[in-house]
Every structure is written in structure tokens, then in C-alpha cells.
Amino acid sequence: HLKFNNIGVEGGKALAEALKVNKSLTSLALNNNSIGVEGGKALAEALKENKSLTSLDLGYNNIGDEGGKALAEALKANKSLTSLNLYRN
């Protein structure tokens, strides 16, 4: 879990790049990290490619409407994710 670590936008983007190639991580908790809209969009792009993640917690990250829309679009392509928390975004 990486909760409450002040990862920020750039950290969210870096994690997204790692998720694109990761084949073993199944759960990632990133709540309360100020990932923001751009970080949310980057994670959405990663979800289009990632095939191992089943649970992603993005609660309290200020991803906004645009980040939420990008994640919704990504779910059309992602077949592995079964749990997504977007509480208070």
C-alpha cells in the first residue's frame, strides 16, 4: 500500500509507466496521494495495457471529472480490474 505518501502528479505518472509493463502486481492502494487529473489520466492509459491488476484504490486523489472519464474509458479495454475505488474525487 502506498496510502498517504504525497506521491503527486509526477509520481502518479511514474507509477502509470511501471504499470504498463508490470505483470505480477494485483492490488494497488494509492488513496490520499494528490495524484490529480493528469495523474489519473496517466493511470487510465496504463490500465488499457495492464493485465494483472485486479484492485485499484484511487480515493481522495483529486482526479476530477476528466480523470474519471479517462478511467471509465480505460475500463472498456481492461479485463482484469474487478475493484476500483474513486471515493471523494
Image (cartoon, grey):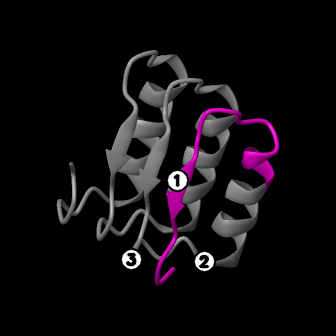
| Residue at the image point whose x is 39% and y is 18% from the top | 24
Question: Badge 1 is on which residue?
Answer: 83
**Front disc: 1 or 2:** 1
Earlier residue among tags 1 and 2: 2
Q: Secondary structure at mark 2?
A: helix
**Front disc: 3 or 1:** 1
Query: Tag on residue 60?
Result: 3
Q: Secondary structure at mark 1?
A: strand
Residues in magenta, as a range: 73-89
Q: Nearer the viewer, residue 6 or 87?
A: 87
* Cα gap from disc 2 to disc 3, whole angstroms: 10 Å
Which amino acid does the dot numbered 1 rest on?
A: Ser
Image position, residue 28 (x, y; %): 35, 44
Residue 84 among magenta residues: yes
Query: Tag on residue 64?
Result: 2
Earlier residue among tags 3 and 1: 3
